[in-house]
Image (tube, grey):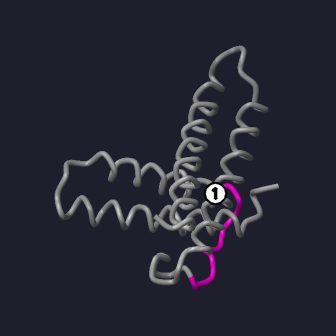
Amino acid sequence: MSQQLADWVSARHDAIGAVLDTLAAEHQLSDAESSVLDLTGAEREMDVTAARLADAVDALPDQRKPVGWDQAPEAGSLQEARTRFVRAVLRALAAQYAEESADAAADAEYADDMMSLAARDLRARGGAP
């Protein structure tokens, strides 16, 4: 495995973890002891990992980049970009754990591409510090 691909795998793993941490922090807001600062910190970490994932995709050879990578990021607010990224990560997780088949493999690859594009869009919104 090339170093660029290894960096992408690591960044993908970290981004998934950050999204799950953000969802957990959001869910915990209903607890009396929770703080919105926990959610804000989790969102900032998610932004950082999304930017790292986008940077890792930038470093990949062109044939490994998702279709549409060279196009302008989608318009929208920071919160919209975060929501698209969370949804893309959840789709990638669902595809990863789907029953094995040729369709599932294609769905997983497509979901990874959408996650990378959503990471690029979030990076463009300036979510990372």
- The secondary structure type at the circle numbered 1 is helix
- Looking at the picture, does residue 99 appear above or below residue 56? above
Coordinates of residue 48 in the picture (x, y in percent): 71, 53
**Callout 1 amino acid:** Ala
Taking 41 as reference, is 114 left or right?
left
Coordinates of residue 74 in the picture (x, y in percent): 60, 74
Q: Residue 76's image quarter?
A: bottom right
Q: Nearer the viewer, residue 4 or 69?
A: 4
Coordinates of residue 121 in the picture (x, y in percent): 63, 68
Residue 71 drawn in magenta: yes
Taking 73 as reference, is 125 left or right?
right
Residue 107 drawn in magenta: no
Residue at 71 percent across and 21 percent down: it is 34
- Residue at numbered disc 1: 50
Taking 36 as reference, is 60 left or right?
left
Which portion, as a residue range, is magenta? 70-79
Residue at 58 percent across and 50 percent down: it is 15
